[in-house]
Image: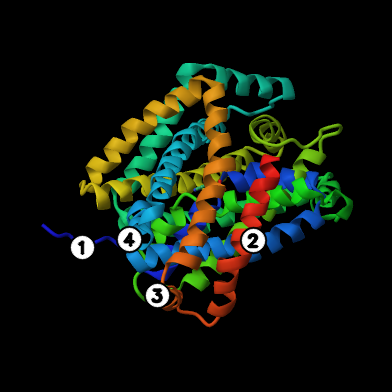
Amino acid sequence: MHQQREHFGSRFAVIMALAGSAVGLGNIWRFPYMVGRHGGGAFIIVYIVCSLLVSLPVFFAEGILGKSTRLNTLGAIKKVAPKWRWAGYMGILAAFVITSYYSVVGGWSLDYFIRSVSGGFKGLSMEASAGIFSRMTSSAWETLVSFFGFLLLSAMVVAAGVEKGIGRFSKLMMPLLFFMIVLIVVKSLSLPGAKQGMDYLLKPDFSKLDGPAIAAALGQSFFSLSLGVGCVLTYSSYMKSDGKIFQTGLWTALFDTIFALMAGFAIMPAVFSVEGLEPSAGPSLVYETLPVIFSQMGVLVPVIFFLAVLIAAFTSSISMYEVVVAWLVDEKKMPRPRAVLLVFVAAAALGTVCALVPAVFNACDFSTSNIFMTLGALIFVIIVGWCMPSHIARDTFDGKAWPVVHFLIKWIAPVAIAAIAVTNLL
Ligand code: TRP
């Protein structure tokens, strides 16, 4: 029996779903720290230039591949450039690996949200907070329960379908997320550390802009826009034919960048309001420092903050989940519920190993963000720039900016990505 392929109900749903994929833990715990470390406002400028010249063209290339073929990552590549099909398998594998380890961290945010609701952060000291975090991560039981909880919730949304699950959920959650982060920013800017925090983020220091800083800006922009593994490709394959790739990309990048900056404005003033505290990246910032500071600002602040972290992580996680599910549904002709179940079982297995063995967690993170994503992004622009008949690409893109975008996809993006990849390897 031939079933019609699913699609998103509206352009708004597509943009909210893609923004949901883009806005995630990368915005909250990597971006603010990277900006501060690599020269503040100067880094932000480089980040925006990288996004416009390289990341957005990759986004458009994925969008064109998805929308023109209406297929999953592997199916789209097989159809347009069969000799690159291995890259399709690589993308799906990468999406699967990211789903697994990202959900472990997503589980922490679920754990912290529940903790904040039950008042677990009241009168918290720095030592006590570090203790809570290390107990959580070293307790196999607690880590696994929250990981399974998070993965199960993702599975439920994905199982509900493209529009009824992912689309509806994103349309509801993304505006709510935005509203919550605005509340925290307003609260945070009233703290004594506001000026220092803003200086840390915005004051440009061009002397810190070296090669590694530029490579970091591009890498962060790729990760943040969910590029290189087929998330954008898969979601774009569910666009209706009147969907606009150009506008969708611009809105997603705009939303993503604004959210990253706001996360910085929410977090850094809070960090600097405590004497002697230095910002750090990653889990210790979000899960050790912030609960202490936010809990001093009232019971509601930590609840709102950790709900925001949870939603951000969750909408990103479902986008990777869907990449794998779309492949099983299109290529293996599996009914959606069975595909969702299969991915659940496999990701639960890999995620359990990630949760229990830090070396595996790090290997998954390193290989996907440094190798698979970059290589995947490079191949997507090569396929659209060089293998796909250019009138098909142009008609699918359907926008006045095509000549510029085509040039960026064909020449600038591949050269820049290859240059960065080589610099990273040296
Ligand atoms: N962009 C998300 C974040 O900032 C993470 C993410 C979702 C992602 N899908 C991806 C990263 C695909 C790489 C590839 O947290």
Amino acid at dot 1: Gln
Which residue in the structure is indicated by mark 2? 51
Tell me the residue at 37%/48% (across/down): 322
Q: What element carries label 2?
A: helix
Residue 303, given in percent of the width and then of the height, sits at 57, 40
- Of the residues under marks 4 and 2, which one precedes in the sequence? 2
Q: How crowded is mark 1: few (under 14 residues within 10 Å), some or many (20 or more)?
A: few
**Furthest-left residue in this view:** 1
Amino acid at dot 2: Ser
| Position of residue 32 in the picture relative to residue 67 (left or right) | right
Which residue in the structure is indicated by mark 1? 4
Amino acid at dot 4: Lys
Residue 178, given in percent of the width and then of the height, sits at 57, 56
User: Would residue 299 be visible to someone looking at this image?
Assistant: yes
**Camera-side residue: 208 or 76?**
76
Tell me the residue at 51%/72% (across/down): 246
Which residue in the structure is indicated by mark 3? 392
* Image height of 50 relative to 296, above or below: below
| Circle on res. 79 | 4
